[in-house]
Image: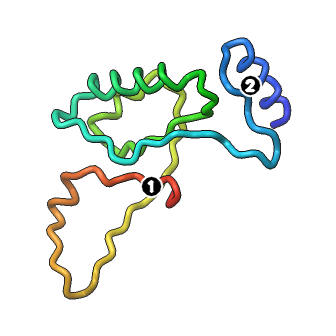
């Protein structure tokens, strides 16, 4: 991994990206907590991603985290960006007497809390 880091940091200097942090330092990142596109149009999401990328590319951040679900209609918006899949499961926990409309949860995109991943 030292060689990978060395190569990445060399490319980062040339492309004006932030280098990877030193051992003991933290990654600087941004994350999207509640993306919502009323039409579920990936072109709109792509325009938003491009704008965020353009604004923050040279701000010293290492990455942007966004929750993209399996079969998410917005997934095409992320093509062309370097991505990493992180498998996760979402559990709904309620009190036994709680009335839950499961259909509502199937139709909605959950909020994304980076601290929980």
Q: Secondary structure at mark 2?
A: helix
Which mark, by number, is residue 35?
Answer: none
Q: x and y percent of residue 10 in the render?
A: 78, 19
Marks 2 & 1, CB-CB < 8 Å contact: no
- Residue at point 40%, 22% (across, down): 51
Q: Mark 2 or mark 1, which is nearer to you? A: 1
Q: Secondary structure at mark 1?
A: loop
Q: Which residue is mark 1?
A: 113
| Other residues around mark 1 within 10 Å, as few (<14) / some (14–19) / many (≥20) | some
Q: Work out whether 114 lies above or below 39.
A: below
- Residue at point 32%, 70% (across, down): 92
Q: Which residue is mark 2?
A: 8
In the current view of this chain or complex, which residue is farthest to the bottom? 97
Label tally: 2
Q: Work out whether 59 lies above or below 101.
A: above
Q: Quadrant of residue 5?
A: top right
Mark-to-mark CA distance, 2 and 1: 28 Å
- Residue at point 16%, 59% (across, down): 104
Query: 64 left or right of 35?
Result: right
Q: x and y percent of residue 94 in the render?
A: 29, 78
Q: Which part of the image, by quadrant, shows the N terminus?
A: top right
Q: x and y percent of residue 73 in the render?
A: 26, 36
Q: Earlier in the sequence, mark 2 or mark 1?
A: 2
Q: Quadrant of residue 20?
A: top right
Query: 114 left or right of 47?
Result: right
In the current view of this chain or complex, which residue is farthest to the top? 14
């Amino acid at each position: 991994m030292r060689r990978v880091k060395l190569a990445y940091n060399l490319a980062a200097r040339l492309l004006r990206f932030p280098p990877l942090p030193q051992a003991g330092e933290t990654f600087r990142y941004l994350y999207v907590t509640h993306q919502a596109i009323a039409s579920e149009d990936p072109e709109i999401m792509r325009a938003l991603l491009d704008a965020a990328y353009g604004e923050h590319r040279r701000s010293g951040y290492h990455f942007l985290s966004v929750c993209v679900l399996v079969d998410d209609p917005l997934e095409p918006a992320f093509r062309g960006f370097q991505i990493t899949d992180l498998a996760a499961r979402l559990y709904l926990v309620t009190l036994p007497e709680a009335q839950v409309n499961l259909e509502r949860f199937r139709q909605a995109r959950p909020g994304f809390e980076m601290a929980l991943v």
